[in-house]
Image (tube, helix red, strand yellow):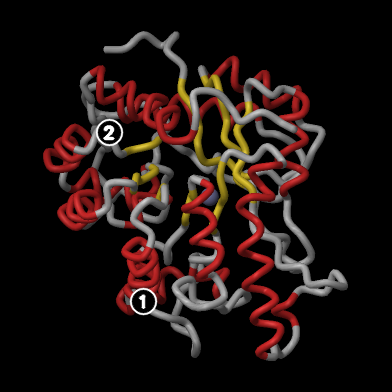
Amino acid sequence: MESTSDTLIDAHVHIFSDGLYEGIRQSMEAGGCSHINFLSVPRQDGRGTYNEVALSYKKIDPERFYCFGALDYSGPNGEPFHFRSMTAADRAALAECLGRQPAQLKAQGFDGIKIIEGAAGVRRILTFPLDGEIYAPFFAAAEKERMPLTWHVGDSPERWDPAKMADLEKAGDRVYNQPGDQSLEAFRAEAENVLRRHPNLIVIFAHYYFLGGELQRARDLLRAYPNVCLDVTPGGRMYKLLNDQWDEARQFHIDCQDRLIFGTDLPGLANKDKWPIGSAVNSWRGMRAYFASDGPMAGPCPGAKFLEPGQTMRALNLPQPALAKLLRENFRRIVGKAPARLP
Ligand SMILES: [Zn+2]
């Protein structure tokens, strides 16, 4: 088993406020996390992004933080393009504007780009299909600039499952059964159309591409697209699904050990102005223990809340080389040995 002094890189953390550096640094030191990759997203009001917030941490401590920028949809007057009925000229202007952003983000010191636009909830606002004309120049430029993408595709399958809808709605979770919502398979088809057009595009699909319950399909995807990786950031019932097929799940993590990237989403962090030191440390410890330790999980671990009564979560006990790749080496190989320099 690996030593707890071996650090991890958390490739999937969102940040919405600046000024939290001291708490972040303390939690990283206590939780054995050497680097965080902050993922920016567009602002909900459509006016700009959280890119400057993410970069503010890199400016304080450029060795410790990677940053993936978000796309900016602001139009020429600051008014977001998609907030009005778009003419053909608007569509062309937006496509051109998005196409310039990979090079701009790279020049600003970003390490990659976060694509939240494939998330089913976000699609209700940013309605453009990712394999359509609006994004074509963007994906071509991301491929050319070799900017890695962390891409959220669809959402957890149960959110489209009529048998589970009522329970989810009761729990206040979003379900995608409204007019205009598209199917999970339609989101996946968009993503795979883009991959076919851009074989050199570097893509990290977030949350195992929501294939935690379909590991053969995950293997097929990784085989078909050599520049695709999956991040293991928890999403929906995924870790319960892995636990339900423990032998196959462990073998998947061993066979695909070069293609998996560690991330947490640091649960409960969204829109908080205070950095939750304790819960960050617990997330890192619990997730590391899930992959590294052996036997039933005693402490907190991802997906535990979805277990049925009497079920326990069993840790994956990955061999050392697979674990080191998952926790840090794959990210370094794909994104960079150290964070990109600021200009
Ligand atoms: Zn996320």
Query: Which SS class for mark 1?
Result: helix
The image shows residue 221 at horizontal and vertical percentages of 24, 55
**Would residue 57 be seen by someone viewing this image from the given angle?**
yes
Residue 60 location, quadrant: top right
Residue that appears at 36% across and 65% down: 197
Picture disc at residue 258: 2
Q: Residues within 10 Å of mark 1 (few under 14, many from 20)?
A: few
Asked if residue 116 is positioned above or below residue 36 in the image, the reply reads below
Residue 280 horizontal/vertical position (percent): 57, 31
Which part of the image, by quadrant, shows the C terminus?
A: top right
Residue denoted by label 1? 186
The percent coordinates of residue 293 (x first, y second) are 28, 21
How many labels sit on residues? 2
Q: Which of the pair 228/169 is nearer the observer? A: 228
Question: What amino acid is found at the position of numbered circle 1 in the picture?
Answer: Ala
Looking at the image, can residue 169 be seen?
A: no
At horizontal 24% and vertical 46% (from top left) the residue drawn is 242
Q: Residue at x 24, y 49 (%)?
A: 222
Q: Amino acid at mark 2?
A: Asp
Q: Is residue 294 left or right of residue 31?
A: left
Residue placed farthest to the front in the image?
A: 144
